[in-house]
Structures are given as C-alpha cells and as structure tokens.
Amino acid sequence: MMSWGVDRLQAEARKVAGWTTTALGFTIPIWVVADSILVGLLIVCWAASGEWREKLRRVTTNPVAVGAILLFAWLLLGTLWGEGELEERALWVKKYANLLLIPLLISMAVDAQERRRAFLALAASLVLTLVLSLVLSAGFLSAKEGLTCDSSNPCVFKKHTTHNLLMGFGSLLFGVLAWKSSQRWGRWGWAVASCLAASNVLLMVQGRTGYAVLAGLAMVAFHGCFGWRGMVAAVIALSVVFPTAYQISTSFRDRINLVATGVAQWNPQMATYDGVTERMEFFYHSVEIIQDHPLMGVGTGGFAHAYAMRVQKMGLSVPTHPHNQYLLVMVQVGIIGLCLLLWVFLQQWRFKPLGEEMSYDLLGRGLVVTIAIGCLFQPALNDHTEKLFYCLFSGLVCSRTDSQFGTKA
C-alpha cells in the first residue's frame, strides 16, 4: 500500500511537471513573476517524481545535458578566483543557474505530446504579443509605462531587443506550424502569422538583434527544407528583403544608419554615450582584459571590478556586462569557458530527436541560432527572458523518452 501511494505521488508529480513546462511556454514572453513561480514548481515536481537512477542515466548519456552541467560547473568554480565581491559572485552564479534546467528537463524524458504543448503555448503567447504590437503600432493602444515603446517602436511586455529576438523565433515557429498543419485554414493562418512576425521585426520594432536573428533563422529554414541549395536561395531572398526594408521602413533605416555612424565616429580613448559606440567601447576594453587573463579569466562575478581597474584613469563608466555573452564568459572564466559554451551549442546543433518529425530538428537548430546570435549583442544567458526561453526549450527539444533510448525504465 505504501509503495502504491509513493508511485502514485511520483506519477502525479511528473504529470504536473509536464503541464508546468506548458505554462512556462506561455508565460516566458509576457510575465516574469509567473516564470519564477512556475520554475520553482517545476523543480519541486521534478524532485517529487523520483526515478533517480533513470534520471541519472538519461543525463549522463545525453551530450547536451553533460555540456550544460560542465559549463555551469566551470562558472561555479570561477567564483574561487578573481577579486569580485562575494555578493557579485553569488549574483552571477544565480544568473547562470538556469543552465541546470536543461539537464533537469532531459532527465524527465519529455515526450512528444509535452513538447508539442509547450511549443503551442509559446506560439499562442507570441501571437498575443504580435497582435498587441500591431494594435500599438496602429495607435489604438497606449505604451506600457517604464518601457520606451510607442507606435513608432511597438514592443509589448518586454524591451524591444527581447521582443524582436522572440518574435524572430516566432516567425520560424509559425512557419513550422503552417508546414505541419493538416487543415487549410491552419496552414494559411500560421503562414500569415509568420509573415506578420517577420514584418514586425523588420519594419516596426527597433531591436537590431532581431534583424540578425531573422536573417540567421531564414538560413536555417531554407537549409532545413532544401539542403545546401537552400542557402543560396536564402542569400538571394535576404539580399532582396533587407534592402527593401531599408527603403520602406524609417525605423529599420534609422537603426542601420546609427550603426554605420557609430562605427565611423568611435574613438577608444573617449567616453561615448551612444548605444553603438558605447558597446564598442565595452567590447574594446573587455578584449584587453581577456588578453591579460586568457586561460581562466578574472573569475565569475569579477567583470565589473576588472573593468573598473582597466578604465579608472580614463573616467569611463563601468558597465555590469559588455553586452556580449562570449566576451563576458571569456572575461569571467577564460577560453575554457568559451569552449564549453560553444561545445554546448555544437552538441545541440548536432542533436537529432530520434523517431520524431523533422520539425523539432528545425526548431532545435533555430533555437541554437537565435541564442547564439543574441549572445553577440547581449548577455543572453543572463537576461531573464532570453535565458529561460533558451534553457526551457533546449531541455524540451533535446530530451528523449526511454523508448528512444532503447531501454525500459
């Protein structure tokens, strides 16, 4: 009787964990507080679901899970060296802790139904975001207080950089749903949503990261559908779409011109306050720190202290991060940390969802491209929405059921 009660409790906990991932798929683009509550519930349900031996086997035989654990372990070890404050080290460890959601979800052996539910929940949330953005762009909705968004920059729920990154992935997700839909209205509906999402990124919202993400995802989609010949088609399509966007969208043209002007005017010896030149300043001094500490960095949580020591005589401001995840990881934990991060991305790119549709392979690769490009312009593994989006769906896409392992739990 006792054993039956424990088994039932574990089964119910596992079921709730599956629905929690669905709820997270919906809340990540729109609601930070709900994210935190649901992540806590997911961890509790994971712990209550038991099957520790099977969970360990699933993690140790999955290269993506192993890579995520090794990356977090190295970042955790990075707190043992450098001169950052104890509070700063603890803060950065907390930021990176979401990486552990990847092996946690992989250990649960997520099935196809749970995975599909989570992606559909994400699609529903992004459709809601897209509709509100279009309404805001038309002037029928007031801007959200605290965000620099209005009809000329119609992001909702998140800042424009995050909005465009998620909406860029949404364009791919909607396209995949259109491709897999068995109903005519479904195919046309998702296809229209995909086109509107791409237009929202290029023509309306001012997040330049989204432009690069959309271009990268176009390459992934064309390659996934047509092989290497599709890459040529993608280049041709992008060479038409982007110049057209430059001509017809004031927002797109202004953001591109700002980059060109910033690059031309940047001087590494002068303090700058423009978004582009300021980031170049951060990149420049971060590279100098890396040159002094190439192997192991200045320690997790040591970026601000090392940067302040570098620029204290120049009177420059000290950022909390260099707006580039790769540089941040190298400054903190050196070339070893960067190699571990790139190894995780590589393993995800190579991962094949056994016995499942090609659509998950396409979405999985699209997820890697989205976050890898995002890391070029922001600390995507530290910003709440981006890191949770990446870790949740990485764990879902890279998980396999026990039947796919060829063994029975």
Image (cartoon, rainbow, N blue to C red):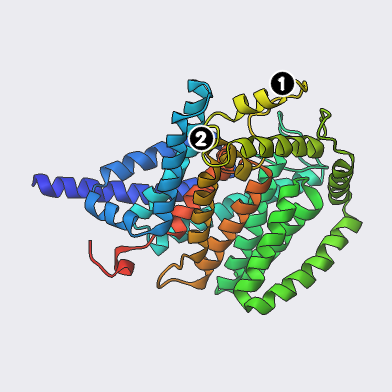
Q: Quadrant of the C terminus?
A: bottom left
Task: Examine the image and state in which quarter residue 62 appears.
Answer: bottom left
Q: Nearer the viewer, residue 150 or 48?
A: 48
Residue 340 in sight in this render: yes
- The first of marks 1 and 2 along the sequence is 2
- Measuring from the top left, give residue 337's x and y in whole percent: 51, 45
The location of residue 136, given as percent across then percent down, is 76, 43
Number of the label disc, if any, that sits on residue 49: none
Asked if disc 1 and disc 2 are in contact, CB closer than 8 Å, the reply is no
> In terms of depth relative to the viewer, which is nearer, 66 or 4?
66
Q: Is residue 39 left or right of residue 286?
A: left
As measured in the structure, the alpha-carbon distance from the residue carrying label 1 to the one carrying label 2 is 27 Å
User: With 118 as the anchor, is 281 left or right in this view?
Assistant: right
Q: Nearer the viewer, residue 31 or 322?
A: 322
- Which marked residue is nearer to the observer: mark 1 or mark 2? 1
Quadrant in the rendering for residue 76: top left
Front residue of this view, candidates 27 and 304:
304
Amino acid identity at mark 1: Gln
Farthest residue to the left: give it: 1
Q: Which mark is residue 312?
A: 1
Identified at 28% across, 56% down, the residue is: 57
Residue located beneath label 2 in the image:
95
Q: Amino acid at mark 2?
A: Lys
